[in-house]
């Protein structure tokens, strides 16, 4: 398979960097004056669980796995720090194409780890946690990879928010999602409320957050939150195969598509049109484009 020229790759990398910088402004506020590194170190004193990253270079698919099954995959301060490290690693993985997000055990994620939550009850700690998790989840959602969350069990509270970071959501028949934050006297704190509105519309998002209803896989599919419900026992394998059918393209093309979609979702129409054009230009006339023209792939 022919490759893009070094100049074209450089242009695309520069464009990707520019759009990430533009979109990162959506995460920052004038009140968030904290250092991500400092917050990560501060929260690392809350132990429990791990987050694993596995990168398969041959397929171009990375897998993030929550490993805290004994606590229903609740997210500890330590795991928050690991997620930040993983995001930074994936942002620099230029040959990647896809990302799977899954968990061990019968739960997808039950939200924040209780011991971590108890240690973060002050207003200042709440702002730091929200700042950190907003950054992490938003950056995951903007990775130049096609991402799929595999919901193999209940995803509650912050766990429900984590399901919204991916481009697609695949549910097992036992998968469930519940935005139950209001029961606990709070609302979404990891940017999941805004993403939920984008996914299902403001009226349905309000309904889910007000009623705290825990919806099953069928209901999630019917409202557009689930994209597929698995039928095999090996949920991960089925999810991987589902993803692979959608990323059978060059990493550069996939990254350009993802940047265009993210811009259309998060930026104004005028800015989005500009990004779409800039994502298109480096691909036009490249080796991959010319090879496809010669082989008449469009009509095959």
Image (cartoon, rainbow, N blue to C red):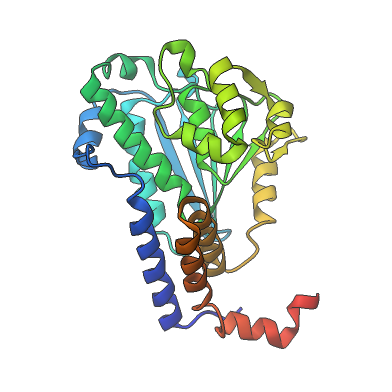
In the image as oriented, which residue stretches furthest toward the right?
300
> In the figure, is residue 103 to the left or right of 271?
right
At which x and y percent is residue 62?
Answer: 51, 50
x, y (%) of residue 87? Answer: 38, 47
Camera sees residue 266: yes
In this view of the protein, which residue sits in the foreground, 195 or 133? Answer: 195
Dividing the picture into quarters, in which one does residue 234 lie?
top right
Q: Quadrant of residue 135?
A: top left
Q: Which quadrant holds the N terminus? A: bottom right
Q: Residue at x 35, y 64 (%)?
A: 18
Q: Residue at x 55, y 41 (%)?
A: 198
Q: Relative to 291, is 164 above or below?
A: above
Residue 219 versus residue 248: which sits nearer the camera?
219
Q: How many marks?
A: 0
Q: Is residue 51 left or right of residue 249?
A: left
Residue found at x 22% / y 37%? 31
- Residue 299 pos. (x, y %): 80, 77
Question: Where does the image place residue 292, in percent across and percent down from the top left?
Answer: 68, 81
Q: Nearer the viewer, residue 23 or 129?
A: 23
Who is closer to the viewer here, 25 or 11? 25
Q: Quadrant of the C terminus?
A: bottom right
Residue 106 in view of the camera: no
User: Which residue sits at x=31%, y=27%?
Assistant: 77
């Amino acid at each position: 398979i022919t490759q893009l020229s070094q100049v074209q790759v450089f242009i695309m990398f520069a464009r990707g960097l520019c759009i990430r910088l533009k979109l990162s402004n959506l995460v920052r506020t004038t009140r968030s004056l904290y250092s991500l590194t400092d917050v990560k170190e501060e929260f690392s004193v809350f132990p429990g669980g791990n987050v694993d990253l596995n990168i398969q270079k041959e397929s171009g698919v990375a897998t993030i796995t929550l490993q805290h099954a004994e606590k229903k995959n609740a997210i500890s301060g330590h795991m928050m720090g690991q997620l930040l490290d993983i995001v930074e690693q994936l942002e620099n993985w230029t040959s990647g194409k896809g990302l799977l997000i899954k968990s061990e055990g019968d739960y997808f994620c039950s939200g924040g780890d209780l011991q971590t939550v108890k240690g973060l009850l002050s207003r200042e700690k709440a702002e730091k946690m929200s700042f950190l998790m907003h950054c992490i989840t938003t950056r995951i959602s903007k990775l130049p990879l096609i991402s799929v969350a595999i919901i193999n069990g209940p995803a509650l509270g912050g766990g429900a928010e984590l399901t919204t970071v991916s481009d697609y959501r695949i549910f097992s028949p036992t998968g469930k999602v519940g935005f139950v934050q209001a029961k606990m006297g709070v609302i979404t704190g990891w940017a999941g409320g805004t993403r939920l509105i984008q996914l299902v519309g403001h009226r349905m998002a309000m309904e889910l957050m007000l009623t705290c209803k825990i919806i099953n896989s069928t209901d999630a599919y019917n409202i557009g939150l689930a994209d597929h419900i698995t039928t095999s026992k090996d949920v991960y394998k089925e999810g991987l195969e589902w993803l692979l059918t959608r990323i059978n393209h060059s990493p550069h093309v996939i990254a350009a598509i993802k940047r265009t979609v993210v811009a259309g979702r998060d930026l104004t129409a005028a800015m989005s049109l500009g990004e779409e054009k800039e994502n298109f230009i480096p691909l036009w006339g490249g080796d991959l484009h010319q090879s496809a023209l010669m082989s008449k792939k469009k009509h095959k």
